Image: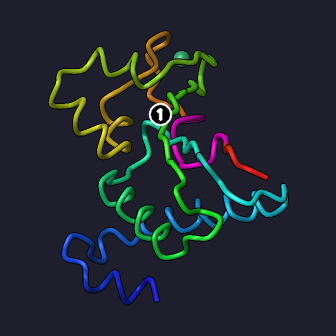
Amino acid sequence: MLIVKLKHCSILSGFYMHEWALAESILTAAVEAAEKEKFKKISEIVVEIGELQQIAMDAFEFALNEIIAEQAGILEGVKIRFKTEESNLVCNNCGHEWSFSDMKKKLNEDQGESIHFIPEVAFVHSRCPKCNSPDFEISKGRGVSILSMKGEK
Ligand code: ZN
């Protein structure tokens, strides 16, 4: 039923299916957790989004609101808050750890923007700030999860 509605909406296209799926899985997980805790209502959900997660926030928020309106019940009137999870990068050569924000300072604005949208570019433009090795991994800052929830019993 939700999918049908999606097709009629001009700002959502196949491109935003990712955001829709994310919104759906976040809310499903929240409802499941709330039912386990015997909550009658969920009043607030804090969603944590990694700063390197590729997500269209307007589409994500739209999907959340649509699903909440559709399901009502336990989700009625819920407030969704967003928090950014700072990234963490680890050098495979020397073990040094740093964050995307540190890295961004070293790049010019244009490159910084392209990294925001395409995290893979980070691997092209950056090296470990300590040993200069290009061999590093993103250990934090990707993905979307529920940080906390408030509810009424
Ligand atoms: Zn290093």
The amino acid type of the residue labelled 1 equals: Thr
Q: Name the residue under label 1.
A: 84
Residue 110 sits above or below residue 114 on the image: above
**In front: 45, or 130?**
45
Residue toward you, 91 or 47? 47
| Left or right, 25 with reference to 16 | right
- Place of residue 103 in the rendered image (x, y in percent of width and height, measured from the top left): 37, 20
Percent of width and height locating residue 108: 18, 21
- Taking the image as shown, residue 98 lies to the left or right of residue 126, namely right
Q: Viewer-proximal residue, 142 or 73?
A: 73
Q: Is residue 15 above or below residue 58?
A: below
Residue at 50% of width from left, 66% of height from top?
A: 68
Residue found 47% across the figure and 33% down from its top:
84
Residue 151, percent across and down? Answer: 70, 48
Up-down relation of residue 120 to residue 124 (above or below): below
Question: Is residue 140 within the magenta segment?
Answer: yes
Regarding ligand 1, which quadrant of the image does it lie in?
A: top right
Q: What element carries label 1?
A: strand
**Chain part drawn in magenta:** 138-148
114 relative position to 140: left or right? left
Rate crowding at label 1 as few (under 14), some (14 to 19) or many (20 or more) other CA atoms within 10 Å: some
Q: Is the magenta stretch mostly helix, strand or loop?
A: strand
Residue that lies at the very extreme toward the top in this rendered image = 130
Residue 104 lies in the magenta stretch? no
Q: Residue at x 77, y 57 (%)?
A: 39
Decide: is 152 above or below 81: below
Front residue (pair 81, 116): 81
Question: Which image quarter: residue 102?
Answer: top left
Q: Position of residue 87 (x, y in %)?
A: 50, 30
